[in-house]
């Protein structure tokens, strides 16, 4: 019975195909539009793509946004992984509190968050310009908060799925320190969740517009919005290019994550 | 060397304000030269320099223009906000300014709203990236002055800007105005609409759109005004305008899709009620849409935008130079090229200052149209209240 | 824990509090309840809250269901690994796809001259717009919102599905249980807390969505709370920051209510988790 390679279930195929259709059709519509010739309005021309790819703003803002995304991922994981680990391990009572905090960034629409942030840092704290003027500091600070709900729920589900107490006990009993426990025992087990959180953070930063715009920074989303409001065919091209680029970036994060370690410590029930 | 220059500017400015005669000038000149030598001591000079740089002129004149240019060049940058390149030809205005004076311009948030402009002045106060100048709708100009956001500055050509388009305290000045037009895609729309009454005909089903909602878009609000004028209302009574849109929606003609470049190019919004400068810009931008523009025969409404200098501008001299440029003949004609009537239009026409090459490229009917009505600030405030309550009520249910 | 709470305080709580306090401030600087009572009294604003809640619930539940189904289909045993990577990474991008590009993608698909609209017209002879469909109606907006809700669900629930050990389903099959029994007694209870959390997340995400809705409906066809806030804070016509702050406070209340609903349910559900 175990010799046969597992086949894909038919119901799975149905759902996957339905999903693919729903998600691909609007993209195809956008693609068709992006291939139109600006003079005649009919197929087919690559001028829209040429417009975007030859625009130096496109390249400079992509670099900025990627950089911000990586910084946000690093800061976010550094901050949240130990925190959620600790909550799961020692302070389960704090779970609802942290969970509630994780919902607050949703409730506060970006436009209000940025007004609040600017008011708070400028008027109340009179923060210096090396903080406010640098997207790597101010924007990353805000983006980590925006990514927080996503990272939290991913990590929470991930931690829930492993047996935190047993793993920690085992590791500590074997003489490992806390950092070693966290880094070499726990982390590999929640890798999928952490990667999931990282993807989401990347997508958020590559798609966040309001805060960047109102704080007068020039990021990739502000560039995209500008193109969308002033150009027709290049806007569709830019949309697809940004979609494709972000997707490729995620695939590369995935590959890096995969290569990072094949060992997974599994402590399960009934083995 | 620099310190001397600061003193000179300060001196020239005061001179201009007090309008000295020649002899007094000479006398004072000698005295000042002596004084300048003394106060060129470093600490005093630095303090005086800071003061001079902090006191740019209140009034632009032929004499201090050179000083303004030099000081602006030294500041080395100008921050503008919410100026899309294809709106009233701001693209060409910005590049011409930079080429003429060698001052690079940072154009932030090009599609920002007037509210965001004022907000940026407040939020970014003290930040070198804060906007130096704003171009806002009159409602926000008033709000900005009430909050003390603007600095007083009378441009050199202040006198030739119509009375109704400027603030007497010099806190804002109207730079250009536009009127509501009907733009349409001649490939899709076979029978050109000529008026608001026309647009209610069944042949235009699913075709009429605006540039947003009148609750948030100045252009759409103007559309409601124009519809009011066409539908038996007036500048003080825009209710009929809202009613017209309700009727158009019920008939299925008005679709609540925001007009964007994509919707124009794709034909999704074959008819768009929008400012003349926007509709005319589409003609050249989207040849595939075969866009044509018509001034509605039954409802002609116009409104102007307002230039103001930020009171906390990081580059106050460059800000004033920008004002001077915009209100100069050259700047005003650049607006005209972008299909926006410059504020000093009447003056330019009277002095025959507009080159034939420019006028021949513009539609004559639009160029000389005089029928547009302008609402006063009071009328606009009243209209906002009406729109705020009636628009969601009459059009909000889908 | 300290760094976490310190960070949350600096970048979230205090700025948010600044705004919430603003909800109670009046134009002259004093404190007042007028902003709040004002928005409760206005029928249009009550409609907007109701509409926002309605759409958010629908897209949260539908997005949760479809996301769960697709995630399970992609992750379960038997499905090749590349499917999961492809769908997972695509979801990452799609979850943040919104605003004008998303709105236009759907207008190009299902607008009055969209490709699918025309396809249906040519193949079936039915003009959906004549039958009451419109991309800017509530149904249309919900359909478009699902484009980022379903991927979000996928991303959040995937790690939880990973936690459903293959051994459990094998063991239960060996013991003679049917698929349905497996799900009822093992699968769902394990997944339920995560599903619940995810659905709440989707609700909040949908409630706060602004740019997509504005672009689709031009801020006119459907009253929605974020659009009202946008009108008050960043439009070209009005400026009513106090009402805007009060509206934001209202959003906060709605979500706090959801949380109150969620906590006891979650406690009950997590009894099954271990």
Image (cartoon, grey):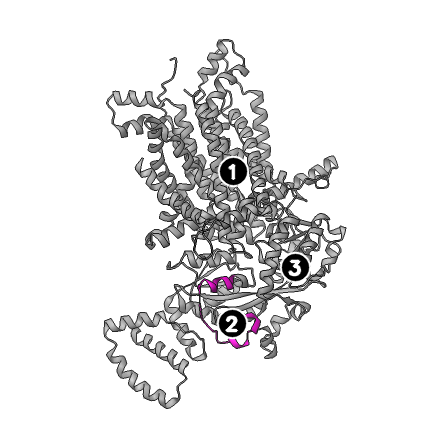
Residue marked by disc 3: B238
Please state which of the two labelled residues, at mark 3 or mark 2, is closer to the viewer: 3
Closest to the observer, B295 or C86: B295
What is the CA distance from the residue labelled 2 to the residue labelled 1? 47 Å
What are the residue bounds of the magenta stretch? B140-168
**Vertical placement of B143 versus C219: above or below?**
below
Please name the residue shown 47% across and 40% down the image.
Answer: A106
Would residue B191 be seen by someone viewing this image from the given angle? yes
Q: Residue furthest top?
A: C175
Please state which of the two labelled residues, at mark 2 or mark 1, is closer to the viewer: 2
| Disc 3, SS | loop
Res B235 label: none
Quadrant into which the C terminus of chain C falls: top left
Q: Earlier in the sequence, mark 3 or mark 2?
A: 3
Q: Is residue B151 magenta?
A: yes
Closest to the observer, A206 or C6: C6
- The answer to whether B88 appears left or right of B124 in the picture is right
| Disc 1, SS | helix
Residue marked by disc 1: C94
- Pointer 2 indicates a residue of which chain? B
Res B327 label: 2
Point out residue B261 in the picture as x, y percentages from the top left corner: 60, 52
């Amino acid at each position: 019975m175990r010799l046969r390679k597992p086949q894909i279930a038919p119901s799975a195929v149905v759902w996957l195909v339905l999903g693919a259709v729903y998600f691909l059709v609007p993209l195809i519509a956008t693609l068709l539009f992006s291939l139109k010739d600006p003079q005649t309005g009919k197929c087919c021309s690559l001028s829209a793509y040429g417009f975007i790819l030859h625009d130096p703003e496109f390249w400079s803002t992509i670099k900025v946004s990627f950089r911000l995304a990586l910084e946000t991922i690093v800061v976010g994981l550094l901050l949240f992984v130990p925190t959620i680990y600790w909550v799961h391990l020692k302070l389960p009572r704090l779970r609802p509190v942290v969970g509630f905090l994780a919902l607050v960034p949703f409730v506060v629409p970006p436009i209000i968050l940025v007004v609040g942030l600017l008011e708070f840092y400028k008027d109340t704290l009179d923060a210096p310009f090396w903080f406010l003027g640098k997207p790597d500091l101010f924007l990353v600070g805000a983006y980590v908060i925006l990514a927080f709900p996503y990272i939290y729920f991913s990590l929470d589900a991930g931690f829930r799925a492993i047996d935190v107490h047993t793993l920690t006990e085992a590791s500590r009993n074997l003489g490992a320190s806390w950092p070693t426990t966290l880094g070499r025992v726990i982390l590999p087990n929640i890798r999928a969740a952490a990667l999931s959180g990282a993807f989401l953070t990347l997508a958020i930063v590559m798609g966040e517009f309001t805060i960047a715009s109102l704080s007068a920074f020039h990021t990739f989303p502000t560039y995209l919005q500008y193109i969308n409001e002033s150009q027709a065919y290049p806007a569709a091209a830019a949309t697809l290019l940004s979609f494709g680029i972000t997707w490729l970036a995620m695939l590369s994060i995935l590959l890096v994550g995969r290569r990072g370690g094949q060992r997974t410590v599994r402590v399960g029930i009934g083995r | 060397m620099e310190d001397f220059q600061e003193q000179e500017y300060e001196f020239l400015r005061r001179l201009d304000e007090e309008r000295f005669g020649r002899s007094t000038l000479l006398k004072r000149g000698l005295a000042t030269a002596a004084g300048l030598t003394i106060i060129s001591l470093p600490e005093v000079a630095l303090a005086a320099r800071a003061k001079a740089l902090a006191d740019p002129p209140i009034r632009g004149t032929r004499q201090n223009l050179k000083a303004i240019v030099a000081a602006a060049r030294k500041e080395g940058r100008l921050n503008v906000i919410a100026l899309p390149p294809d709106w009233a030809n701001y693209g060409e205005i910005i590049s011409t300014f930079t080429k003429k004076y060698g001052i690079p311009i940072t154009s932030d948030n090009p599609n920002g709203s007037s509210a965001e402009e004022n907000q940026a002045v407040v939020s970014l106060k003290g930040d070198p990236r804060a906007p130096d100048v704003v171009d806002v709708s009159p409602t926000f100009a008033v709000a900005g002055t009430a909050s003390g956001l603007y600095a007083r500055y009378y441009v050199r050509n202040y006198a030739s800007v119509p009375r109704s388009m400027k603030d007497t305290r010099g806190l804002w000045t109207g730079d250009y105005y536009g009127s509501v037009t009907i733009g349409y895609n001649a490939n899709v729309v076979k029978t050109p609409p000529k008026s608001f009454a026309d647009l209610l005909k069944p042949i235009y089903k699913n075709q009429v759109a605006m540039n947003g909602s009148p609750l948030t878009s100045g252009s759409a609000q103007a559309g409601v005004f124009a519809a009011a004028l066409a539908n038996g209302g007036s500048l003080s009574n825009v209710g009929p305008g809202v009613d017209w849109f309700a009727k158009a929606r019920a008939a299925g003609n008005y679709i609540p899709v925001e007009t964007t470049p994509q919707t124009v190019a794709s034909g999704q919004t074959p008819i768009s009620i929008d400012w003349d400068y926007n509709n005319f810009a589409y003609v050249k931008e989207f040849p595939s849409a075969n866009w044509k523009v018509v001034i509605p025969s039954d409802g002609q409404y116009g409104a102007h935008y307002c230039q103001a200098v930020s009171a906390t501008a990081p580059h106050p001299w460059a800000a004033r130079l920008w004002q001077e440029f915009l209100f100069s003949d050259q700047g005003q004609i650049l607006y005209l090229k972008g299909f926006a009537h410059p504020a000093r239009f009447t003056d330019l026409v009277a002095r025959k200052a507009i080159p034939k090459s420019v006028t021949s490229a513009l539609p004559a009917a639009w160029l000389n149209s005089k029928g547009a009505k302008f609402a006063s600030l009071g009328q606009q405030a009243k209209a906002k209240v009406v729109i705020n309550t009636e628009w969601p009520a009459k059009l909000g249910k889908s | 824990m300290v760094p976490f709470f310190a960070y949350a305080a600096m970048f979230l709580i205090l700025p948010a509090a600044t705004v919430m306090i603003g909800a109670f401030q009046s134009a002259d600087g004093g404190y007042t309840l007028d902003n709040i009572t004002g928005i409760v009294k206005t029928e249009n604003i009550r409609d907007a809250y109701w509409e926002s809640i309605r759409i958010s619930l629908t897209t949260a539940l539908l997005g949760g269901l479809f996301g769960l189904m697709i995630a399970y289909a992609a992750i379960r045993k038997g499905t090749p690994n590349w499917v999961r990577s492809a769908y997972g990474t695509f979801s990452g991008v799609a979850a943040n796809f919104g605003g004008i590009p998303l709105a236009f993608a759907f207008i190009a698909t299902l607008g009055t001259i969209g490709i699918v609209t025309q396809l249906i017209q040519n193949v079936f002879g039915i003009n959906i717009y004549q039958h009451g469909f419109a991309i800017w109606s509530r149904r249309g907006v919900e359909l478009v919102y699902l484009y980022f809700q379903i991927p979000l669900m996928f991303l959040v629930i995937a790690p939880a599905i990973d936690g459903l050990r293959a051994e459990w389903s094998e063991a239960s099959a060996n013991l003679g249980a049917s698929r349905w029994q497996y799900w009822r007694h093992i699968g769902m209870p394990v997944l339920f807390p995560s599903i619940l959390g995810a659905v709440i997340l989707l609700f909040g995400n949908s409630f706060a969505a602004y740019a997509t809705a504005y672009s689709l409906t031009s801020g006119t066809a459907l009253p929605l709370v974020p659009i009202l806030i946008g009108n008050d804070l960043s439009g070209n016509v009005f400026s009513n920051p106090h009402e805007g702050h009060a509206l934001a406070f209202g959003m906060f209340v709605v979500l706090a209510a959801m949380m109150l609903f969620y906590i006891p349910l979650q406690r009950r559900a997590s009894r099954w988790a271990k």
